Amino acid sequence: MKTVILLLSLLIVVATAKAQTEKEKEYVQRAMLDYVEGFYEGDTNKINRSISPEVVKYGYWKDEKSGVYGGEPMSFREMIAYAARVKQTNRQQPATAVRKVEVYDIQDQTASGKITAWWGTDYLLLAKVNNQWMIRAVLWQGPLKR
Protein backbone atom coordinates (compact mmCIF):
# COMPACT_ATOMS: atom_id res chain seq x y z
CA MET A 1 0.00 0.00 0.00
CA LYS A 2 2.85 2.37 0.84
CA THR A 3 4.35 1.75 -2.60
CA VAL A 4 1.07 2.63 -4.33
CA ILE A 5 0.73 5.85 -2.31
CA LEU A 6 4.36 6.75 -3.05
CA LEU A 7 3.88 6.13 -6.79
CA LEU A 8 0.65 8.15 -6.88
CA SER A 9 2.36 10.99 -5.03
CA LEU A 10 5.24 10.93 -7.50
CA LEU A 11 2.84 10.97 -10.46
CA ILE A 12 1.02 13.98 -9.00
CA VAL A 13 4.30 15.87 -8.54
CA VAL A 14 5.42 15.06 -12.10
CA ALA A 15 2.03 16.02 -13.57
CA THR A 16 2.00 19.31 -11.64
CA ALA A 17 5.53 20.17 -12.82
CA LYS A 18 4.59 19.38 -16.43
CA ALA A 19 1.47 21.56 -16.20
CA GLN A 20 3.52 24.45 -14.80
CA THR A 21 6.07 24.04 -17.60
CA GLU A 22 3.32 24.05 -20.24
CA LYS A 23 1.80 27.18 -18.67
CA GLU A 24 5.18 28.95 -18.79
CA LYS A 25 5.54 27.96 -22.45
CA GLU A 26 2.12 29.50 -23.18
CA TYR A 27 3.22 32.75 -21.48
CA VAL A 28 6.47 32.86 -23.48
CA GLN A 29 4.58 32.14 -26.72
CA ARG A 30 2.08 34.89 -25.90
CA ALA A 31 4.88 37.42 -25.41
CA MET A 32 6.43 36.38 -28.72
CA LEU A 33 3.07 36.56 -30.52
CA ASP A 34 2.37 39.98 -28.99
CA TYR A 35 5.70 41.13 -30.45
CA VAL A 36 4.97 40.04 -34.03
CA GLU A 37 1.26 40.95 -33.86
CA GLY A 38 2.14 44.36 -32.45
CA PHE A 39 4.12 45.10 -35.61
CA TYR A 40 1.63 43.40 -37.95
CA GLU A 41 -1.45 45.11 -36.49
CA GLY A 42 0.12 48.39 -35.45
CA ASP A 43 -0.86 47.63 -31.85
CA THR A 44 1.40 49.58 -29.48
CA ASN A 45 -0.31 47.95 -26.47
CA LYS A 46 1.04 44.58 -27.58
CA ILE A 47 4.50 46.07 -28.05
CA ASN A 48 4.40 47.61 -24.56
CA ARG A 49 3.12 44.36 -23.05
CA SER A 50 5.78 42.12 -24.61
CA ILE A 51 8.96 44.16 -25.03
CA SER A 52 11.10 45.57 -22.25
CA PRO A 53 11.90 49.29 -22.66
CA GLU A 54 15.56 48.26 -22.16
CA VAL A 55 15.45 45.95 -25.20
CA VAL A 56 18.46 45.64 -27.48
CA LYS A 57 17.45 45.00 -31.08
CA TYR A 58 19.77 44.76 -34.06
CA GLY A 59 19.00 43.60 -37.57
CA TYR A 60 20.65 42.75 -40.86
CA TRP A 61 18.90 43.48 -44.15
CA LYS A 62 20.19 42.28 -47.52
CA ASP A 63 20.14 44.89 -50.26
CA GLU A 64 18.49 43.37 -53.36
CA LYS A 65 20.73 45.20 -55.85
CA SER A 66 24.14 44.77 -54.25
CA GLY A 67 23.46 41.54 -52.33
CA VAL A 68 25.30 43.06 -49.37
CA TYR A 69 23.97 42.99 -45.81
CA GLY A 70 23.72 46.19 -43.83
CA GLY A 71 22.95 46.35 -40.14
CA GLU A 72 20.95 48.71 -37.98
CA PRO A 73 19.74 48.96 -34.38
CA MET A 74 16.13 49.63 -33.40
CA SER A 75 15.26 51.15 -30.03
CA PHE A 76 12.14 50.51 -28.00
CA ARG A 77 10.91 54.01 -28.90
CA GLU A 78 11.43 53.25 -32.61
CA MET A 79 9.45 50.01 -32.24
CA ILE A 80 6.53 51.90 -30.73
CA ALA A 81 6.74 54.54 -33.48
CA TYR A 82 6.86 51.87 -36.20
CA ALA A 83 3.77 50.10 -34.84
CA ALA A 84 1.94 53.42 -34.56
CA ARG A 85 2.79 54.24 -38.21
CA VAL A 86 1.44 50.85 -39.34
CA LYS A 87 -1.86 51.70 -37.65
CA GLN A 88 -1.94 55.35 -38.82
CA THR A 89 -1.20 54.48 -42.45
CA ASN A 90 -3.54 51.46 -42.39
CA ARG A 91 -0.72 49.12 -43.49
CA GLN A 92 -1.58 46.13 -41.28
CA GLN A 93 -0.48 42.71 -42.45
CA PRO A 94 -3.18 40.25 -43.50
CA ALA A 95 -4.12 37.40 -41.16
CA THR A 96 -2.39 35.04 -43.61
CA ALA A 97 1.02 36.74 -43.22
CA VAL A 98 3.67 34.34 -41.91
CA ARG A 99 4.01 34.38 -38.10
CA LYS A 100 5.75 31.25 -36.94
CA VAL A 101 6.69 31.14 -33.24
CA GLU A 102 9.18 28.60 -31.91
CA VAL A 103 10.13 28.41 -28.23
CA TYR A 104 13.62 26.95 -27.81
CA ASP A 105 14.22 26.95 -24.07
CA ILE A 106 12.58 28.10 -20.86
CA GLN A 107 14.30 28.39 -17.50
CA ASP A 108 13.12 30.04 -14.29
CA GLN A 109 14.16 33.56 -15.33
CA THR A 110 15.13 33.35 -19.02
CA ALA A 111 13.76 31.94 -22.26
CA SER A 112 14.71 31.90 -25.93
CA GLY A 113 12.91 31.50 -29.21
CA LYS A 114 12.59 32.31 -32.88
CA ILE A 115 9.97 34.15 -34.88
CA THR A 116 9.59 33.91 -38.64
CA ALA A 117 7.72 36.94 -40.00
CA TRP A 118 7.23 38.65 -43.36
CA TRP A 119 10.42 40.68 -42.86
CA GLY A 120 12.65 37.73 -41.95
CA THR A 121 13.79 35.80 -38.90
CA ASP A 122 14.07 37.15 -35.35
CA TYR A 123 15.93 35.38 -32.56
CA LEU A 124 14.57 36.46 -29.18
CA LEU A 125 15.84 36.36 -25.62
CA LEU A 126 13.22 36.88 -22.92
CA ALA A 127 13.39 37.53 -19.20
CA LYS A 128 10.76 37.26 -16.52
CA VAL A 129 10.21 40.80 -15.21
CA ASN A 130 7.75 41.24 -12.33
CA ASN A 131 6.43 37.74 -13.09
CA GLN A 132 5.80 38.58 -16.76
CA TRP A 133 7.81 37.40 -19.78
CA MET A 134 9.37 40.33 -21.63
CA ILE A 135 11.61 40.41 -24.70
CA ARG A 136 15.04 41.78 -23.74
CA ALA A 137 17.09 41.11 -26.90
CA VAL A 138 16.37 40.60 -30.60
CA LEU A 139 18.77 39.73 -33.41
CA TRP A 140 17.13 39.54 -36.82
CA GLN A 141 17.90 39.02 -40.49
CA GLY A 142 15.86 39.67 -43.57
CA PRO A 143 14.43 39.30 -46.02
CA LEU A 144 12.95 35.82 -45.88
CA LYS A 145 14.24 33.41 -48.51
CA ARG A 146 11.51 32.59 -50.98
Image (cartoon, helix red, strand yellow):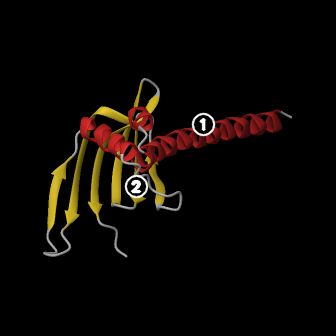
Vertical placement of 74 versus 127: above or below? below
Give the residue pinned by disc 1. 20
Counting from the top left corner in percent of width and height, residue 30 is at: 51, 42
How many C-alpha atoms fall within 10 Å of the one at disc 1: few (<14), some, or many (≥20)?
Answer: few
14 left or right of 77? right
> Residue drawn at (47%, 55%), measured in percent from left and top?
102
Of label 2 and label 1, which has the lower sequence position?
Answer: 1
Please, what secondary structure does the residue beneath circle 2 have?
A: strand
* Residue at the farthest top position: 130
* Residue at the farthest right position: 1
> Residue drawn at (42%, 43%), measured in percent from left and top?
38
Give the residue pinned by disc 2. 114
Look at label 2 and name its amino acid. Lys
Q: CA distance from mark 2 to mark 1?
A: 22 Å
Counting from the top left corner in percent of width and height, residue 106 is at: 46, 43
Q: Nearer the viewer, residue 144 or 5?
A: 144
| CB within 8 Å, label 2 to label 1 | no
Vertical placement of 116 versus 92: above or below? below
